[in-house]
Image (cartoon, rainbow, N blue to C red):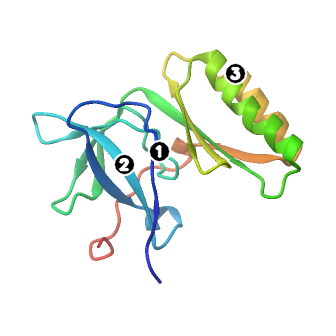
Amino acid sequence: MSKKYVVHEDPVVRTAGQYIAMADLAPFGFPDLWEQIWLGRREDGLFVMQCVPFRIYGLNLFDVVRLDEDDMLVEVVEKGGHRTLRALLEAGLAPQVFDEVAGGIAAQARSAGFALEWSGDRHAAIDVPGDGDSASLVAFMDAHEGAGTLFWEWSDAEPFQAPQRGTAC
């Protein structure tokens, strides 16, 4: 099977000298799927996350990470104080319902001052700073999950896991 890639077309942080690396998503149940991550370089050889992860567990915006010699994410060295809330809209929603839910996610994130990235049109990743009040956003997600229009989770529902040696390409 060939590898597939999840890309960040519009990362929430844009800086000069950004670095792009990859994360193997096999440890999170997505074999043959890789997520592109945008990073800021540090002088000590480590990197800072500059995008909101779509599918990587245990990783958030501004976390400090280590890469291996193949530019693969292998370790979260230091937490940056943010959390990631992710939502996946159900497939096949009526256009009016889809627009209501997707627009509601964007409006909730915007009103709270949270950064938002989309992977395609159904998968949202929302950055929640440590001092951010996510109660309204969570209530919105809970209501729509109960209505069967989306599924949501926190990215720290599982810890970060590096791929087993020999599985990264």
Q: Is residue 155 above or below residue 163?
A: above
Residue 133 appears in the rendering: no
Secondary structure of the residue carrying numbered label 3: helix
CA separation in Å, label 3 and label 2: 28 Å
Q: Residue at x 33, y 75 (%)?
A: 167
**The C terminus, quarter of image:** bottom left
Q: Is residue 114 left or right of residue 14?
A: right
CA separation in Å, label 2 and label 1: 7 Å
CA separation in Å, label 1 and label 3: 21 Å
Q: Residue furthest bottom?
A: 1
Tell me whether circle 2 and circle 1 mark residues in contact (CB < 8 Å): yes
Q: Residue at x 39, y 57 (%)?
A: 161
Q: Which residue is mark 1?
A: 53
Secondary structure of the residue carrying numbered label 2: strand
Characterize the local packing of mark 3: few (<14), some (14-19) or many (20 or more) Cα atoms within 10 angstroms: few
Q: Type of residue at label 2?
A: Ile
Q: Which residue is mark 2?
A: 37
Question: First in sequence: mark 1 or mark 3?
Answer: 1
Characterize the local packing of mark 1: few (<14), some (14-19) or many (20 or more) Cα atoms within 10 angstroms: many
Q: Type of residue at label 3?
A: Ala
Q: Which residue is mark 3?
A: 135
Q: Is residue 147 left or right of residue 69?
A: right
Where does the image place residue 107, in percent across and percent down from the top left? 70, 24
Residue 125, quarter of picture: top right
Q: Is residue 70 above or below residue 147?
A: below
Where does the image place residue 87, in percent across and percent down from the top left? 66, 44
Question: Mark 3 or 2, which is nearer the eye?
Answer: 2
Tell me whether circle 3 and circle 2 mark residues in contact (CB < 8 Å): no
Tell me whether circle 1 and circle 3 mark residues in contact (CB < 8 Å): no
